[in-house]
Image: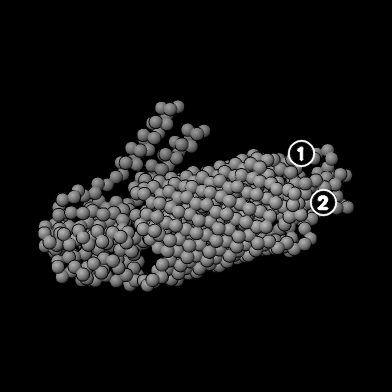
Amino acid sequence: MHHFYQTLAGTALALSMSMSASALELNSVAPDFSLPNIKTHTVSHLSEYRGKVIYLDFWASWCPPCRTSFPLLETLYKKQQAKGFAIVAINMDEESEAMERFLTLYPASFDVLRDPEGVWADTYGVEAMPSSFIIDKKGMIRHIHSGFSKADIVDIENKIVKLLAE
Amino acid sequence: MSLIERLSLAALALPGLLVGGEAQAGRAEELYHADFQYAHYEESKGRMKVDVFELSAVAPIGDKITASVDLVRDTISGASPILNIKNSDGKVEQYLSGASIFEQRDALAVGLSYAFDDVNVSFGGGVSGEHDYLSRHLNTGASWTFNKKLTTLSFTASVAFDEITPTGQSDVKNSKTSQKYLMGITQVINKNSLLQSNMTFAYHKGYLSDPYKAVYVEGVGLEDDSRPRHKFQWAWLTRYVHYFKTLNKAALHADYRLYVDDWGINGHTLELSWHQPIADDWLIIPRFRYYTQNEANFYQATFDAMDIGDIHSSDYRLTGFGTLGVGLKLTKSFHMAGYIKEVKLQMAADYNDRKASYQIGGNDEGSFDDFSFYMITASINMRF
Amino acid sequence: MKKIILTALVLFLTACSPVKPWERGNLALPQMALEGDAQEANFRQHTFFSKESSSGGYGGHGGGCGCN
């Protein structure tokens, strides 16, 4: 009887763990993506941002913490843009219409790209929504963050300022 | 006025349900909630009427703690069944209380929840009172999300202490204690479907009869309603939600609950609702409900000297019957970018018909305690 | 009997297709919420519980967008 439960628990655990994706390691090279830019209507590559400190954000219109993050990120972007800071927000909505409605309420002057198939979210090993990757001037991933709370913006700004000084 | 009816209104079916649910929603978005609802309940045959006013508020404290408070005021009036009698033709008739009773119930509940990485814990308590009834409850709960956030296990436990001092029976003071436990699992099946299955266990001890009800014993007279001093209840609810993208993003909700208690009652509940988005941020929800139960071991419409025992009741809630219900709900949401992020307006109306003949398997008891009731609700929800 | 239910549950759970975190948009829609209106749900359950003998089953968290 005891053996039966052990086997069952083991099976459940093994099967649930087998679906894990692997997030990228810190201090590894950020994969160079090519994704459509909703403003320029051309394809943007990560390599275009080389030499800048990048906040790469995977977000979607249906994600409540994303609503919290956008106005705070917009303020941060305007403040640090001139010093070489860039935000690249990769939208994961299945339909762009939902993204448009979100951007009407929470406008962004930073770059917004589209990855509805989830190809690059998969490559970056996104495990929660939203997920952000702070990339330094040399294209290395220096910080990974899952989720978003209002208080996070302070810590993010500190990290950005440090990397801009490098 | 039936004490059991008012006891039921007073004691939350699952204390902390509102608190727990809202608390987690607040944490995901760190927003303040303010919700106000007005509800009206009315029975046929000039029976019970209830007006309910409820105010709920949720506040995030930092990014891990959520506090909530809930205030309710019920105003209850109308007639209520006391017992059944046999008329001169030998047919059973229900006898209602003559006077129109007026009663007011006030309740307050508070709760606090803390979010760890994958675990959420909550505590809460509350008190509810009317002139002849007082209830105090405490609850606690925990939920654990794992398996890439696709599975959530939930556990809650609550205890309630009730005191009854029936009107016109001032030397009588009765009490009862209740414990309730829930364990459940919520599982994402695929990107379009969700399943939740919960089991609850409840144990009640103390005075469980209704001091305002009686039974008619042929050839003898009237006796007080007398039920066992303990009750064990078990329920298993399964809820399924499925998304239909091509039908303008509609969702089907289907719930089934099995109920068994040790008074001999088995109940089945089936609820279906279709959530249909129409136009911008409008949602229309038609819904259907079917309920059936059989009678308690010690229930009889009327008794005679031969079949009356120590335990006996003629309460219409303990007999076999079925209820068919239909309803419609309409909601409209406004999403804004200012201080107030969202305002939602909701209105709903439901009509329910309770008949002995609707019981599954049939029922030849007669229609003496059949009645119908309708409910109307209107509410405003704000997020800021 | 317990063995059958447990086995069925585990098989059922593991048969579910893995949903990526960014694929939860549909589940996060208001029409997909298990409890879209807690106050109304409470009122309905109170009403039915006071007119019928059945009660219980409601409660529990999960589903939705899985954010944070």
Give me the chain letter of mark 2: B
Give me the chain letter of mark 1: B
Frontmost residue, B134 versus A110 = B134
Q: Which mark is residue B85?
A: 2
Please identify the residue farthest to the front as the structure is shown.
Answer: B171
Query: Percent x, y for residue B73?
Result: 60, 62
Frontmost residue, B159 versus B359 = B159
Per the image, the residue denoted by label 1 is B310
Query: Percent x, y for residue A63?
Result: 35, 60
**Quick one: quadrant of the N terminus of chain B?**
bottom right
Q: Is residue A42 above or below residue A31?
A: below
Query: Percent x, y for residue B146?
Result: 37, 45
Label 1 and label 2: CA atoms lie apart by: 19 Å
Mark 2 crowdedness (10 Å alpha carbons): few <14, some 14-19, many ≥20: many
Label 1 SS: loop
Q: Earlier in the sequence, mark 1 or mark 2?
A: 2
Q: Is residue B336 above or below residue A121?
A: below
Q: Amino acid at mark 2?
A: Ile
